[in-house]
Amino acid sequence: MESNSPSAVLTHFSIEPKDYTIQPLRQGYINDTFTLLHDGVPSYILQRLNTKVFSNIDVLMQNIDHALPYLNDKNYYGISLIKTTDDQPYLKTNNSEYWRMLTMVPNSIAFNTTQDENIALEAGKIIAKFHSLLQEAPLDSFEDTIPGFHDLTLRKQEFKEALAGASSEKLTEAQKAILFAKSTLEEFRFYDPGKLPLRICHNDTKLNNILFDKENKRALCLIDLDTLMKGYFHFDFGDAVRTIVNTADEDEKDLSKITFNKRLFEAFIDGLSTNSDFLTEAEIQHLAFGVKFMPFIHGIRALTDYLKGNIYYKVTYETQNLDRCLSLFAFTKKAIEQMEYMQEAIKKRI
């Protein structure tokens, strides 16, 4: 098959032939995503996977295939992969593009940010439910889709390499971010999660990767499972908090808009506590650390990508990765300032 348009690949999936309308979804930095509608009703999600970011699609899809049977519960909406006409979980085209199709979650909505305590509460519930369900899945069945995804040592090395190869213009433009990255790396030099239990983590639990019921705003499930692999719970905790308690967009240029909303933080913890029996005492003690760790590691990745010429994240303008970095670092600062508060709030609730 030579054509790689969304309409051309449809015939290779096991769906009822209908007159589908295909709409691109602009949300997301990595894959190309399309909604398939029939008579105006969303029916399926179709995605072209980014092989520059995900070099081993077999492993990525195998992880998802292993996880989905566990992610189905009366309090967790189960998503299914649509097999190809030759019974495969994804389609590989003649020119090595990879496509997959998923069932649609009806009447669902996602939020980039929120000021609603109930949304924060529901987010906490569904992330804890996600982890409690995946406790039953064998760890050895999952391989890394992006080796070292949240490995601070690796990200530090990549950052150093980017600094060495960056133009003088970019180094000047990013001077403040570079100084903050260096000082925070020094602060985190003793970080060692090795004594914490490995879990199957989502590894990208930002708020807009949670689907909610449009009517009652109940959290339904997590989406974008490409980074599903082994990790530590404070990865998922910190990633969720950074996008829930901060009501500004991820690439907000006005850093005065970066917030740490304590009401939303406490609501999120209250939600998490409803399904938190699986957590060990050591994991609970690491939760607050995850809130400063995750925005920093995302920030240093965005800074590294900016210095290297924007080769990883999609950008709509040249300095967008730098804006993301500065926004993420601004929230990292807020999280560092709130460490004592977070530890006390967590201690009261979990």
Image (cartoon, rainbow, N blue to C red):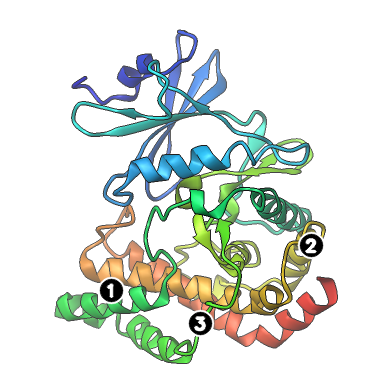
- Name the amino acid, label 3: Asp
Which of these two is toward me, 126 or 121?
126
Mark 2, residue position: 277
Front-most of 53 and 267?
53
Residue shown at 44%/63% (left/top)? 251
The secondary element bearing badge 2 is classed as loop
Query: Which badge, 2 or 3, comes first in the chain's sequence?
Result: 3
| Circle 1/circle 3 CB separation < 8 Å | no
Instruction: Between residue 289 and residue 71, name the one nearer to us.
Output: 71
Horizontal side of residue 187 vs 105, given as left or right:
left
> x, y percentage for residue 137?
61, 48
How far apart marks 2 and 3 lie (CA) works out to 24 Å
- Quadrant location, the C terminus: bottom right
Who's the residue at 35% across and 88% down the image? Answer: 179
Tell me where residue 97 appears, x and y as whole percent. 26, 34
For residue 350, the mark is none
Q: Which residue is mark 1?
A: 158
Callout 1 secondary element: helix
Asked which quadrant contains residue 348, the reply is bottom right
Q: Answer above or below: position of 335 versus 55.
A: below
Give the answer, above or below, for where 80 lies relative to 261: above
Q: Which amino acid type corresponds to the residue marked 2 in the rendered image? A: Asp
Residue picked out by circle 3: 192
